[in-house]
Amino acid sequence: MPGIDECLLEAMALPGARGASLVDWTSGLALGTAGDSPVGDHETTAAETAELARSAAEFDSFTAADDSAGAGPPVEDLIVTTRAGYHVLRFVETSFDSSVFLHLWLDRDSGNLALARLRLRDLAERLVLG
């Protein structure tokens, strides 16, 4: 079971990976980073992606009427497509408040979005926090 650094290194091994981070979406702080940041500063990227994650996790519009699990955020992941890349945010269920997510920034030309989504799901399930 990988810790934060190992998890981010595995994410960076994906084809087209440009940057990866583990972010607390309640505070907007990066708990760990690897690679580059789309804006040149990992803390800015963490704060901006946390706003997006918080919106998706807290709005009722993203909860299915029959979704009664309620253990963590109702959203599993978010994908934002830009002209130059993809941003995949994968929520991580934890034993505490489940307020963290993995953020992977992929190059649009060399990245494999489907593979990245599957690998982030696996990494999120195996990640050891604390």
Image: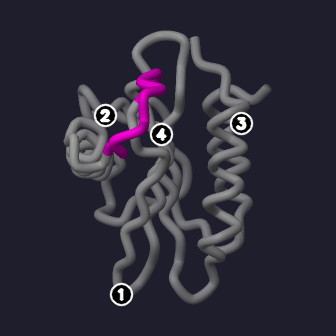
- Alpha carbons under labels 4 and 1: distance apart: 24 Å
Quadrant of the image for the N terminus? top right
What amino acid is at disc 2?
Answer: Trp
**Secondary-structure class at tag 1:** loop
- 109 relative position to 82: left or right: right
Contact between marks 3 and 2 (CB within 8 A): the answer is no
Question: Is residue 76 shown above or below 110?
Answer: above
- Judging by the rendered image, the residue that carries numbered circle 3 is 6
- Alpha carbons under labels 2 and 1: distance apart: 25 Å
Q: What is the number of the mark on residue 83?
A: 1
Label 4 or label 1, whichever lies nearer to me, is 4
Q: What is the number of the mark on residue 25?
A: 2
- Alpha carbons under labels 3 and 2: distance apart: 21 Å
Q: Earlier in the sequence, mark 3 or mark 1?
A: 3
* Residue nearest the observer in this picture, 60 or 101: 60
**How would you classify the magenta stretch by its main secondary structure?**
loop
What amino acid is at disc 4?
Answer: Phe
**Residue, x 31% and y 34% (percent of image)?**
25
